[in-house]
Image (tube, grey):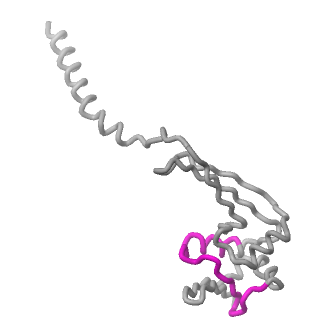
Amino acid sequence: MRRGIMKYIVGVVGIVMLTSCAPQVVSLVPNYTRCCKKIASKTYYDNMDMSRSPMVIDMYYKSNPRIRRIEYEQSNQADADGVCIKYERRYTSKAKSGYLYVNKVIMDSLPEYHHFRYSIDGDVVTKKSCYKLLRLKKSSVKAINGDSRNNVIDIRTK
């Protein structure tokens, strides 16, 4: 008789605990049920969003399309409008670690810069000096400064 009452009490307590915790468990599970109605794509060359890149660099990529490797990534979750973003990251053979590092800093830390100009030690990068920018090594980059008034990113190597 006592065993029957104990089983009944344990069963009731278990059901009460499960039903009281159920809404919390459901709210912790992320919503993966949204489907992609549209897929927007973003192209990155050497860690730089091409919609923000300087004209000099943009012209370089169009005239020298040597791609070392391409990585694809797509977001699994749609935003409120049902748009999923597909990222295409292209890495060129000429870009070295310093240039990749500078672009990553610009994309992460300086979001307000669009169609800016690069300058290395005070000299603005032109079509002819673009190769010097691409060949930067990470160890030679001492500082990256942004001038929002003139829309210039200054890279200090000395």
Residue at image x 60%, y 76%?
Answer: 114
Q: Is residue 10 above or below residue 105?
A: above
Write down the quadrant of residue 133 in the picture. bottom right
Q: Which residues are magenta?
A: 100-126
Is residue 39 one of those drawn in magenta?
no
Across and down, in percent, residue 78 comes to 52, 48
Looking at the picture, tell me which residue is in the foreground, 88 or 38: 38
Foreground residue, 131 or 13? 131
Query: Of 88 and 143, which appears nearest the observer?
Result: 88
**Res 27 quadrant in image:** top left
**Quadrant for the C terminus in the image:** bottom right
Q: Is residue 78 left or right of residue 41?
A: left
Residue 110 colored in magenta in the image? yes
* Residue 88 placement (x, y as % from top left): 69, 56
Q: Quadrant of the N terminus?
A: top left
Residue at the far bottom in the pictured view: 122
Side of 68 relative to 32 (left or right): right
Residue 131 drawn above or below residue 50: below
- Residue occupying the point 68% across, 83% down: 118
| Residue at the (82%, 62%) spot, across then down | 67
> Is 25 located above or below residue 44 in the figure?
above
Q: Which sits in the foreground, 47 or 138? A: 47
On the rendered structure, is 119 left or right of 64? left
Residue 72 lies, with reference to residue 134, above or below; the image says above
Q: Quadrant of residue 26?
A: top left
Residue 117 position, x and y percent, is 67, 83
